[in-house]
Image (cartoon, helix red, strand yellow):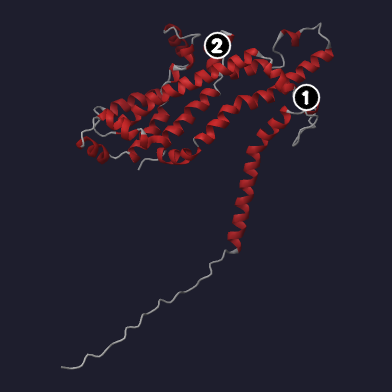
Amino acid sequence: MPEKTAIKKEKIKPIKIKRKIGKTTGDKITDVIICAVMVIMSLCAIFPLWYTVVASLSNPVLVTTGKVVLWPKGVTWIGYKTMFQEKLLWRGYLNTLEYTIVSTFLNLVVTIPCGYALSRKTLPYKGLIFAFFMVPMYFSGGLVATFMVISQLGLYDTFWVMVLPQGVTTFNMIICRNYFNSNIPDSLFESATLDGASVTQFFFKFVIPLSKPIIAVLTLYFAIPKWNDYMTGLLYISQPKKQTLQYIIKQLTSTDAGSDVVDPNRDPEELRESQMKAGIMKYAVIIVGSLPLYILYPAVQRYLIGGMMVGAVKE
């Protein structure tokens, strides 16, 4: 028997090639330009808000004369004191809050099931139903026809005129449908039905928990326009106690609003002071009126970007 020779196996170590990948001069210049542009855009977005805060705390005379720019001067709470004394303003604040909450909830209740139904391939007459939503998106009867319909339905000057006419938004429904197309596959529904789940059970136990990003996005899309709505109250609400916050802000901060402003027998100095108070109050009202949106954005921030990107693209 030939003797077995022991063969030593040497491990071959891979040769690591270190490459220093450095940025070229053109890359560095591009980075500097991009950073500069982003800083300028950020300042353009932040400065109006910062100026509003500064102006709301500054002396009305200094604000009017343009001496307040970056920092408060002659700190005073006149704007906030004047605002808190306006009972009608807080009535409008409460009205707008109610309109926004009810309208957003109704929009979500209608839009999410509608978007999910249109995303399923098994929906009968799917194309016809989708066309039913698309036609009003491009064609409308106009303001006069809308006013006549609202009046004949008995919605004029009621709470529901601020809620029902905007119950469905086709654009947001399409975003919701695209999200379900991309994230709720038919195989998931088939697996659930094999385990005995009904369509309703599948929707509430699978679809809704998987739809948190798009629900957050739709909440913003519905709540922000409703909170800032001015025209609906102007056209369809006549009672001041039912008016929206934006309408009341316009009335209170207008320099020609109120009999005390246009009274020719009033002292000119007192008139000038009243106009300055109205002007300074608008900055305080903007801060307080925007407060709910400042609270809403951080609450849905982690869902916002993902929901917007996935819901806006159809694979």
- Up the image or down, 254 lies above or below 2; here it is above
Q: Is residue 178 visible?
A: no
Residue of label 2: 242
Residue 182 to residue 36: above or below: above
Q: Is residue 266 left or right of residue 221?
A: right
Q: Amino acid at mark 2?
A: Lys
Residue 313 percent coordinates (x, y) = 40, 40
Identity of the residue furthest to the bottom in this view: 2
User: In the rendered image, which residue does mark 1 sit on?
Assistant: 60
Residue 283's disc is: none
- What is the distance, in whole Å, between disc 2 and disc 1 at their CAs? 31 Å
* Circle 2 residues within 10 Å: few <14, some 14–19, many ≥20: some
What residue appears at the point 50 percent right and 38 percent down from the top-left corner? 301
The answer to whether any part of residue 75 appears in the image is yes
Q: What residue is drawn where x is 62% and y is 47%?
A: 37
Is 134 left or right of 94, judged from the image as shown? left
Label 2 secondary element:
helix
Closest to the observer, 140 or 264: 264
**Image-quadrant location for residue 185:** top left
Q: Earlier in the sequence, mark 2 or mark 1?
A: 1
